[in-house]
């Protein structure tokens, strides 16, 4: 697998059902030293080109990668934003899972802002001639990244509303002093829900204030960002 970070800078785990893999892992931020003079990441982080200062001017500042040999039956956890390159040392079957939660939702938001900025730089020369330039930037961002700002809003909304319903259910159960252990393991705990909500509110506030988001037609969003934020703040 070429050198990359996972979708939306999510966390992931990868379980080896059979076979062996070698992982080269770089902590988040190290990728800055691994970009070429045009700002692009290499396909292969072990390629001899990386030692050429004219092509990769900051490579000498990078740390060596963490190297892991993953055996059959082992699970590797990849922290949010860590870039990695993976080799199958044998025929291998593995199962991966990616996720975003309260701990890395702000990382996802930073990533989306960087992606939009990259699109804006790329088509900057069309800003004046094209009327719906901001909309076009969102469209290109969605096709490259998989999501645009309005979809990100809906993503945050679904997470927030789910956490609120957990809190409301939790309060009901407390007041009726019912202790349903099955429910307790099938849903997040109250503290977890509050933590996620607080982090989501921070990101939602930043999104609502973001000038690229505010330039979009937000009338289709229900509830409106202001109404959702108010609801969340009172729930917390
Ligand atoms: O197992 C692999 O080859 C790489 C898995 C991986 O990094 C990914 O799916 O994002
Ligand atoms: Fe990956």
Image (tube, rainbow, N blue to C red):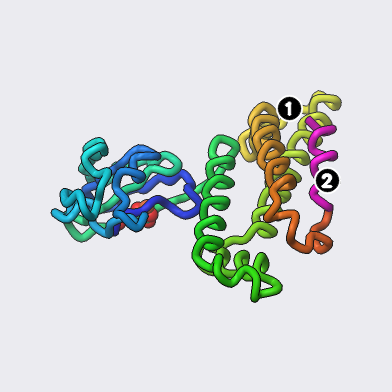
Q: List x then y, in percent, for residue 224.
A: 83, 52
Q: List x then y, in percent, for residue 163.
A: 72, 39
**Residue pointed to by mark 2:** 226
Q: Residue at x 54, y 39 (%)?
A: 104
Residue 20 visible at all: no
**Residue pointed to by mark 1:** 179
Q: Quadrant of residue 38?
A: bottom left
Near-viewer residue (15 or 108): 108
On the picture, is 8 further left or further right than 33?
right
On the picture, is 232 further left or further right than 198?
right
Q: Ligand 1: does it lie within 8 Å of the C-beta at label 2?
A: no
On the picture, is 50 further left or further right than 17?
left
Q: Secondary structure at mark 2?
A: helix
What count of labels does the image hold? 2
Q: Nearer the viewer, mark 2 or mark 1?
A: 2
Contact check, label 2 and label 1, Cβ < 8 Å: no
């Amino acid at each position: 697998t070429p050198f990359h970070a996972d979708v939306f800078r999510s966390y992931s785990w990868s379980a080896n059902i059979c076979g062996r893999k070698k992982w080269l892992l770089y902590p988040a931020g190290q990728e800055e030293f691994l970009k070429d003079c045009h700002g692009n990441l290499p396909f292969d982080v072990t390629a001899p080109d990386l030692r050429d200062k004219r092509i990769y001017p900051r490579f000498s500042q990078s740390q060596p990668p963490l190297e892991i040999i993953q055996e059959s039956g082992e699970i590797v956890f990849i922290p949010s934003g860590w870039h990695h390159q993976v080799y199958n040392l044998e025929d291998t079957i593995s199962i991966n899972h990616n996720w975003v939660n309260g701990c890395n939702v702000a990382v996802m938001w930073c990533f989306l802002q960087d992606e939009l900025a990259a699109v804006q730089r790329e088509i900057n020369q069309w800003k004046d001639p094209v009327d719906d330039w901001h909309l076009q930037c969102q469209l290109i961002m969605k096709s490259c990244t998989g999501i645009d700002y309005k979809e990100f809003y809906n993503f945050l909304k679904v997470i927030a509303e789910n956490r609120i319903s957990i809190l409301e259910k939790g309060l009901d159960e407390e007041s009726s002093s019912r202790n349903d252990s099955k429910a307790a393991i099938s849903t997040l705990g109250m503290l977890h829900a509050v933590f996620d909500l607080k982090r989501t509110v921070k990101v939602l506030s930043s999104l609502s204030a973001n000038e690229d988001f505010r330039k979009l037609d937000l009338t289709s969003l229900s509830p409106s960002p202001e109404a959702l934020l108010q609801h969340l703040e009172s729930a917390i």
